[in-house]
Amino acid sequence: MSSPSPNPVPTEACGEAQPRPRNTGDLFWSFTWLALQGFGGVLAVVQRELVEKKRWLTNEEFVEDWAVAQIMPGPNVVNLSIMIGDRYFGLRGAMAALAGMLIFPLLLVLVLAVVYAQFASHPAVAGALRGMGAVAAGLIAGMGFKLAAALRKHPLGLWPCIVLAGLTFGGMALLRWPLAWVLPALGGAACVLTWRRIAP
């Protein structure tokens, strides 16, 4: 059995201990299953599995961890898996979660890449993939609305968060500013404002 986490696990409102992974094997298979579901809309899958089904994180914790994962180099969901694995089982947990995210999905992607190379020029295949793009966009939009519910408990308050989100959307989607500009400027401003609000 894996040793217990050195950090206390948060409790839910009902007073029961928040669920946690049983061991590093649980982390590996959980993130393997999560990764194998993540076709086109991995954010929605991650939130549903970790928050709604397994309840390893609250929605507010998920938003905070996802924000950190986004500003780190590398794929967001891989960064998140490492953070969660490390939180519960240290380096062993981080490696188990990372292996779960990568091993079987890598093998599957290699197989699919070989198959796709045989049929990529077929018009029906190209049309089908364009249709999947619309579904992926819908998944991302729906996930955004779901995560926005957590902003009601943010230290800044709902309306300042909405303003920051609107400025980010405007800069990225409408003005086409590079992420390297938007993230330090608006992300830094959000961090400073939040720190000033919660600092003693």
Image (cartoon, helix red, strand yellow):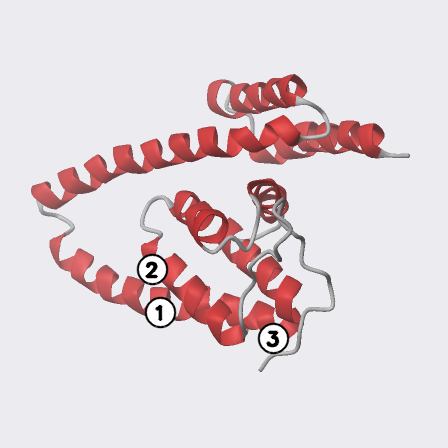
Label count reads 3
Image quadrant in which the N terminus is located: bottom right
Query: What's the amino acid at mark 3?
Result: Arg
Q: Residue 92 placed where, x, y %?
A: 61, 75
User: Disc 2, disc 1: CB below 8 Å?
Assistant: yes
Residue furthest to the right? 200
* Residue at which label 1 appears: 104
The disc, 2 or 3, on the residue closer to the chain's N-terminal end is 2
| Residue at figure coordinates x 54%, y 74% from the top left | 23
Element under label 3?
A: helix
| Residue at figure coordinates x 53%, y 74% from the top left | 24
Q: Is residue 35 left or right of residue 10?
A: left
* Residue at which label 2 appears: 36
Q: Residue 175 placed where, x, y %?
A: 52, 18
Q: Is residue 125 left or right of residue 178?
A: left
User: Disc 2, disc 3: CB below 8 Å?
Assistant: no
Element under label 2?
A: helix
Callout 2 crowding tier (Cα within 10 Å): few <14, some 14–19, many ≥20: some
Q: Which mark is residue 31?
A: none
Q: Is residue 73 left or right of residue 99?
A: right
| Residue at figure coordinates x 36%, y 44% from the top left | 41
The disc, 1 or 3, on the residue closer to the chain's N-terminal end is 3
